Image: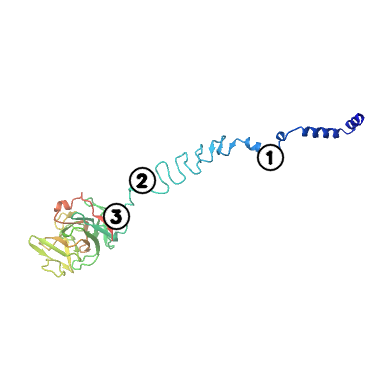
Amino acid sequence: MLHTFLRTLIYRPHYVLLVFLLALNLSCSDDDIVTEDDMEVGDVQGDSNDDDEGTNDDEGTDDEDGDNDEGGDEGGDNGDGNDDDGNNDDGNDDGGNDDEDADNGDGDQGGCTDVGNFVFSESNGLVNVEFENAVFSESWEERSTGTNFSGDGYMVWTGNQFLGQPGNGLATFSIEINNPGTYQFLWRSSVTTGNNGTEHNDTWLRFGDADDFFAQNGNSIVYPKGSGKTPNPEGGGADGWFKVYRSGNDLDFKWQARTFDNNAHNIFVTFNEAGVYTMEISARSSGHAIDRFVLFNSSFNQSDAVSDGNELSAISCN
C-alpha cells in the first residue's frame, strides 16, 4: 500500500493536492468562508460617504438639509443673501413690491390719467384748480413763458375773436361741491396781445347747472343774458354766459374776474346741494391768458383764497 501511495505521489501529484484541499476545507467552519455577497457589503462600508447623514466629508456638503458651504443653494438660502424663492435678504423682494414702491403710488392725479375725466373736489369751502387741467381745442395754446404763473403753464386763446358769440373754443371743468352754498369766482389772467389792458382781456364763463349764477356790486345784482333772469349787465352776453374780464394796464397775471361794462361786478355761483357741477369756458378775446381759478365761500377772504400756499383741489375720476 505504501508502494502504491508513493507511485501515485510521484506520477499523479494533482490527485494528492486535490485530496489535501478537500481535507482542509472540511476542517474550516462556515463563519470563516468569505462569500461574494460578503465582498459587496464590505465595499459599501469602506466608502467615505455616509448615506444616512447625507454628508460628503471631502466636499463638506449635506444633501439632506440643503446647505452648501460654497454658497450654492438648491432649496434654501444662498451665501450671497439671495433666496431662490424670490426673497432677497437685502430687503428687496423679486416677487413683489419693496418698501419704497409700497409707500409711493404711480404719481398719477388721484388714479386718473385722462384729463377729460378729472373731477376737482371742493374742500373746506375752496376749489383751487390749474386752468391747463382740461381738454382744449387746438386754438388754445399752453405756454410757460414768464415767471408769474403756477403749475405747468397757462392757456392762451390764439384763434379768432368771438366778441358776441359764446360757445366757441369750449372747455369744461367738473367740480364736486361738498359744502353747499354761495361761492365767489376768481381767475388769474393776463393780456398777451397789445399793450391796452381793456382789450384782449376777457373770456366767456357759464355755470349752467348751478342753482344760481350772478354778479354783484354792493346792492346791485345782475344775471347773464339769456338766463331767464333780470336785470342783465351792460355789455356782451347770451345763452347764460357772462363776459368775464380783468382791467387795468398792468398786463401781467393778476387775480380778477368781473362783468358789466364800466360798472365792475364780482362773479358768484350758488350750489344748493352737494354734488358734481360743470363749469364751462368759451373763447372770446384772442391773447387772453388764464393760469388758475378758484371758487371760495364766505369762510375765506379773497387774499387767503388766492394764496399760492393753498393746496390744489384733489382730483378724482368722473
Quickly name the residue at label 3: 110
Q: What element carries label 1?
A: helix
The number of discs equals 3
Q: Which residue carries the number 2 mark?
A: 99
Sequence-first disc among 1 and 3: 1
Out of 139 and 81, give the one closest to the viewer: 81
* Lower position in the chain sequence, tag 2 or tag 1: 1
The residue nearer to you, when weighing 26 against 93, is 26
**Residue 16 image position (x, y, % from top left):** 85, 33
Residue density around tag 1, few if under 14, some if 14–19, many if 20 or more, within 10 Å? few
Residue 126 vertical position relative to residue 282 in the rendered view, above or below: above
Crowding at mark 3 (Cα within 10 Å: few <14, some 14-19, many 20+) = some
Q: What is the CA distance from the residue labelled 2 to the residue labelled 1?
A: 63 Å
Q: What residue type is labelled 3?
A: Gly
Visible residue check, residue 103:
yes
* Residue in the foreground of this view, choosing between 227 and 262: 227
Which label was assigned to residue 37? Answer: 1
Task: Please tell me in which quadrant of the rendered image residue 184 appears.
Answer: bottom left
Q: In whole angstroms, how far apart are the C-alphas of marks 1 and 3?
A: 79 Å
| Residue under the point 71% across and 38% down | 35
Please report the residue visible at 65 percent of the width from the left and 38 percent of the height from the top: 41
Q: Is mark 2 on a helix, strand or loop?
A: helix
Q: Look at discs 1 and 3 and give the one toward the viewer.
A: 1
Is 124 left or right of 94, judged from the image as shown?
Answer: left
